[in-house]
Image (spheres, helix red, strand yellow):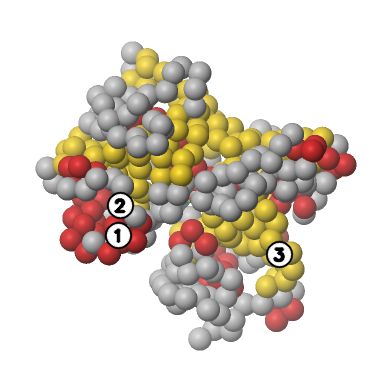
Amino acid sequence: MPETEGIPCLLMRGGTSKGALFLASDLPQDPTERDDLLLRIMGSPDPRQVDGLGGAHPLTSKVAVISPSPDTGADVDYLFLQVGVDTALVSSRQNCGNILAAVGPFAVERGLVQPSDGHTEVRIRMVNTGSTATARFATPGAVVDYDGGPAAGCAVAIDGVPGTAAPIRLTFEATAGSSTGALFPTGKVLDHAEEVDITCVDNGMPSVLMRAADLGLTGDETPADLEANEGLAERLAGLRLAAAELMGMGDVRGATVPKLVLLAPPRAGGSIATRSFLPVRVHTSIGVLGALTVAAGVLAEGSVGHDLAALPAPDDPFRVEHPTGHFDVEVALEATPDGYTVSHSTALRTARKIFDGRVFPRPHL
Ligand code: NQM
């Protein structure tokens, strides 16, 4: 279908992020053509993304491409694409657990999965890393309940999103080392880069953990304060390149991974306080896989943050504090003679269908 007739698109909030969701069959198969089209749909490159769907922040400049899965262990395949805001870049190098929360409902909306009357489970293969997740959500009368009416059991609030909505439970398998090959990609729980203690960890989101205090910070700064600190930005950029080399990720200039996370003792009854970098803009909350990765890293004895944390009792969730509240996750980390393993991780999110229609990409500049 010519693009002048518009491309079917569902605009959705997934967790604390927002993005445009497409059926793979509605987009060009060739990745170069697809990415060119997505840049024009989102209005990139432009710091305001004024001519497209993007929201002028990495957390609202996201795309999901969904198709039936050829894998017998999954119902659908989900490819996540981060669309640059002021750069003409589309990257498949990272996953996104927040947009993942919207994928199960999208699969029902588009008829890829038959919903049950009650609750529906959708098994999702995250194509970026090959790991899988299961989303469980309310579908009373075989229709997705986004708001959390009586059939959803209850409506829940997630910090960083106003109001309440129906819960979407996400269960992850095989996230450990999904991008880098190992939960602790350097083979150690503690390393040093540019004279700073770091823990390099990947429970679904390759991340470099460090103590805020080691950088002269409290860990309580607002995202705006951190983004305005030019000296910090320069120091973190150097640290990130050095850490990525240790993690075997090569030259990550221009890449959105690894993320950087500053840790501090919890201030609001949680397990640890965080400020995470995307890696330049500062997250207003924290990513889903980002939070699972922080929890796995901090739970490991000897890591950066282990001694700063108030570790939860065995059956309690790990509460990650962030700039707009907290995020509870469960991470089953086990010590083995060969190191640590994670059998599964879970997180609770919500999602919402915002707009269903056809999007009209701007023409080539
Ligand atoms: O870590 C932002 C987000 C994310 C990623 C980012 C995410 C995750 O909050 O699973 O969700 O880290 O770029 O959308």
- Between disc 3 and disc 2, whose residue precedes? 2
Kindly identify which residue carries mark 3: 355
Instruction: Give coordinates of residue 146: x percent, y percent.
Output: 72, 48
Name the residue nearer the viewer: 187 or 342: 342
Other residues around mark 2 within 10 Å, as few (<14) / some (14–19) / many (≥20): few
Q: Amino acid at mark 1?
A: Asp
Residue 354 sits in which quadrant? Answer: bottom right
Q: Position of residue 33 (x, y in %)?
A: 56, 70
Residue 312 locus on image (x, y percent): 42, 23
Using the image, tell me which numbered label, if any, was put on residue 225.
1
User: How far, Cα to Cα, is label 1 from label 2?
Assistant: 6 Å
When the figure is inspected, residue 57 is found, relative to residue 257, above or below; the finding is below
Question: SS at mark 3?
Answer: strand
Mark in front: 1 vs 3: 1
Asked where in the image residue 7 lies, by quadrant, the reply is bottom right
User: Quick check: can you spot residue 179?
Assistant: no
Q: Which residue is mark 2?
A: 221
Badge 1 marks a residue whose secondary structure is: helix
- Residue farthest along the front direction in this orientation: 268
As rendered, which of 13 and 120 lies closer to the eye? 13
Measure the alpha-carbon separation of dots 3 and 2: 35 Å
Left or right of 322 on screen, residue 197 = left
Give the mark nearer the N terminus: 1 vs 3.
1
